[in-house]
Image: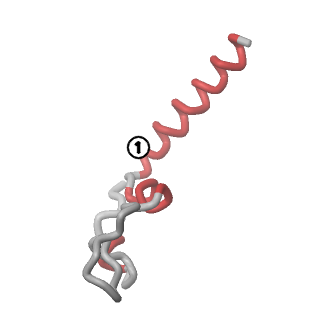
Amino acid sequence: MVSDAADGADARPDAGDGTDPQSDAPDVAGPSLVDRWTALDRGWQALALGLGIVAAHLVGQAL
């Protein structure tokens, strides 16, 4: 299945190039974690979540 994240920036009017529409200064913080997460394809999201769960399980077993 193809992710629609590629056209997600075009669909949101507030998603821009990281600049504040009221000024010419770029956004220093950059894209938020939520924006970066939602830009990922669902397969990459599933892989990241799976690896996080496995890592948490291994840490739990080590303690």
Q: Is residue 36 left or right of residue 57?
A: left
Q: Is residue 62 above or below residue 28?
A: above
Amino acid type, callout 1: Trp
The residue lying toward the viewer, choosing from 10 and 32, is: 32
Callout 1 crowding tier (Cα within 10 Å): few <14, some 14–19, many ≥20: few
Vertical comparison of 57 with 52: above or below? above
Q: Name the quarter where the N terminus is drawn.
A: bottom left
Q: Position of residue 46 (x, y in %)?
A: 49, 42
Which residue was labeled with disc 1?
44
> In the rendering, at what x and y percent does residue 38 appear?
45, 59
Image quarter where the C terminus lies is: top right
| Circle 1 SS class | helix
Image quadrant assignment for residue 53: top right
Q: Pick whichever, 31 or 51, lies toward us.
A: 31
Q: Residue at x 45, y 60 (%)?
A: 32
Residue 12 placed where, x, y %? Answer: 39, 80
Rendered location of residue 26, percent (x, y): 29, 71
Kindly indicate the quadrant of the structure image that contains residue 10: bottom left
Q: Would residue 56 appear left or right of 43 to someone viewing this image?
A: right
